[in-house]
């Protein structure tokens, strides 16, 4: 059984109408099923559980989704889930969707997260997609679940109201924000689809040090009220991807070698450490 390290820091208390999404929500497809991921009963090519060849190698199962292009059922690259574990209140936590993906076909895939919810069944979509390159190998990707990172597609509710009461979640290909996906002749492989919690530490950290720009392209700057000694950068699976020494209250950090996604940077000063998330574009 594959395991994921959940980085869960300091819980907050919220009053919401819907059940709060759990940071234990995680689909690794090791049970031989699609774990609720579907693309509609009329599709000629529904998602399939492939028992071998995932990011873990031999014996690692994954989900395969094939879209045929053109028009009609099965033409668009899209999978959706309405299982209870994926439904409820996403806004009460600071969380991201983390997954592994690759494509063996010849088109780049622009993967977005889309949701339906709220009293008016309003739909929203990730404003910015992550790119799964054509003929790619397995890579790790992250899509933000912050309200600021979504675009309203259709309906009378606000993005925040949708995130408070999600009734359907979708992973799809589209070069613009969309709830229905885009027609393409391609194949998408997905694995280790899970919710990771990064809960409620921003206010405390803002008093300790400032990180800019965030999102970052190549270089980030740290500014602190006290002298810093070292830093370490972790991906959302808990793996350390960079580290270095700091001498003083300012530091420029080269992040150009990091893949696009969400990271945590931990800064040490004496016996104290503090952590903040950032996005690498």
Image (cartoon, rainbow, N blue to C red):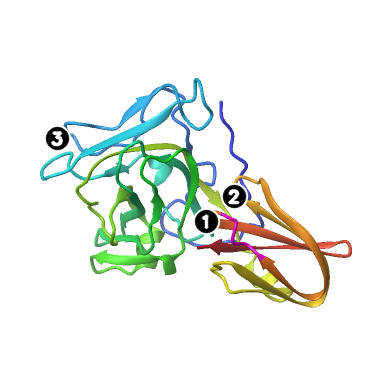
Dot 3: element: loop
- C-alpha distance separating marks 2 and 1: 9 Å
**198 relative position to 173: left or right:** right
Front: mark 3 or 1: 1
Report the disc number at residue 146. none
Disc 2 and disc 1 in contact, CB within 8 angstroms: yes
Residue 163 pos. (x, y %)? 39, 60
Q: Which of 67 and 194 is in front in this view?
A: 67
Q: Give the range drawn in magenta.
A: 254-258
Q: Which residue is drawn at 39% across and 47% down?
A: 133
| Residue 155 is covered by the magenta coloring | no
Circle nearer the N terminus (2, 1): 2
- For the point 36% across and 30% down, which residue is it? 34
Q: Which of disc 2 and disc 3 is earlier in sequence?
A: 3
Where is residue 144 drawn, in percent x and y? 47, 58
**Residue at coordinates 46% horizontally, 63% vertically from top-left?**
146
């Amino acid at each position: 059984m594959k395991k994921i390290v959940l980085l869960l820091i300091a819980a907050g208390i919220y009053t919401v109408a819907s059940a709060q999404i759990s940071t234990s929500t995680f689909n690794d497809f090791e049970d031989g099923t699609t774990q609720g991921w579907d693309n509609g009963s009329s599709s000629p090519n529904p998602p399939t559980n492939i028992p071998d060849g995932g990011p873990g190698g031999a014996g690692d199962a994954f989900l395969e989704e094939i879209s045929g292009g053109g028009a009609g059922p099965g033409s668009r690259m899209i999978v959706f889930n309405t299982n209870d574990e994926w439904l409820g209140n996403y806004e009460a936590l600071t969380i991201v969707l983390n997954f592994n993906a690759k494509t063996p076909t010849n088109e780049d895939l622009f993967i977005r997260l889309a949701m339906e919810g709220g009293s008016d069944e309003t739909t929203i979509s990730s404003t910015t997609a992550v790119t799964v390159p054509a003929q790619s190998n397995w890579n790790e990707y992250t899509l933000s679940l912050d309200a600021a990172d979504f675009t309203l597609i259709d309906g009378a509710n606000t993005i925040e109201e949708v995130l408070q009461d999600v009734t359907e979640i979708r992973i799809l290909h589209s070069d613009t924000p969309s709830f229905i996906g885009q027609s393409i002749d391609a194949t998408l492989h997905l694995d280790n689809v899970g919710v990771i919690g990064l809960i409620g530490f921003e206010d405390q950290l803002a008093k300790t040090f400032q990180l800019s720009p965030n999102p970052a392209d190549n270089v980030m700057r740290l500014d602190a009220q006290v002298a810093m000694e070292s830093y370490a950068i972790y991906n959302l699976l808990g793996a350390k991807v960079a580290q270095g020494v700091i001498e003083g209250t300012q530091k420029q950090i080269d992040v150009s070698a990091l893949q696009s996604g969400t990271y945590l940077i931990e800064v040490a000063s004496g016996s104290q450490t503090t952590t903040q998330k950032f996005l690498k574009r």
